[in-house]
Amino acid sequence: MMNRIVKRDTEFRGQSLKAGQFVSVILGSANRDESKFEHADRFDITRQTTGQMAFGHGIHHCMGMPLARMEARIVFEELSERMPHFHITEGRTMEPLSTFVVHGLSKLPLTVKQEAFEA
């Protein structure tokens, strides 16, 4: 989410915005645009990121993007290596946090695969 002050009177998608008005832009909602992404509300680690807004755009593009992507890759690699017998519990779903500022999970139902105990 980014907060901005409107520079000059303008209209955006039918909404009048007045100079000096405070506005909040929720970038996470841009990444859930069904016209840009198939199944936009579903977590898909293989999704092509062309057109995503998570790291800004143009002169406001986040210089930390490569670091954030590397950190995420390391986390997923370490989790899959350290916890190879865990999987999401069948019939249960991940529960997202109920906030529009930070994306994440409030619950992740995991089960240990039976073969982990059959050694």
Image: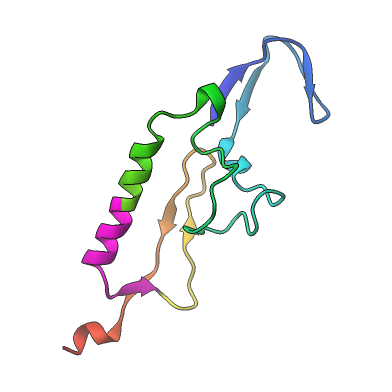
Residue 94, percent from left and from top: 47, 63
| On screen, residue 43 above or below 118 | above
Image side of residue 57 versus residue 23, left or right: left
Tell me where residue 53 sits by quadrant. Answer: top right
Please tell me whether residue 43 is drawn above or below residue 64 in the rendered image.
Answer: below
| 69 sits left or right of 97 in the view | left
**Quadrant in the picture for residue 62:** top left
Give the image location of residue 70, x and y in percent: 32, 45
The magenta segment is: 74-88
Image location (x, y in percent) of residue 21? 68, 14
Q: Where's residue 2, x and y in %? A: 54, 27
Name which residue lies at 21% across and 65% down. 82
Between residue 11 and residue 69, name the one nearer to us: 69
Asked if residue 78 lies in the magenta stretch, the reply is yes
Please state if 76 lies on the left or on the right of 100 as rendered. left
Residue 65 belongs to the span the image colors magenta: no
In the displayed orientation, state which residue is furthest to the left: 119
Q: Is 94 or 45 nearer to us in this picture?
A: 45
Q: In the current view of this chain or complex, which residue is farthest to the right?
A: 14
Q: Residue at x 27, y 75 (%)?
A: 85
Give left or right: position of 87 versus 43.
left
Quadrant assignment for the C terminus: bottom left
In this view, 82 is above or below 55: below
Rendered position, 11 above or below 40: above
Going by the picture, which residue comes out furthest to the bottom? 118
Identify the main secondary structure in magenta: helix
Which residue is pictured at 47% across the width and 57% down the height? 45
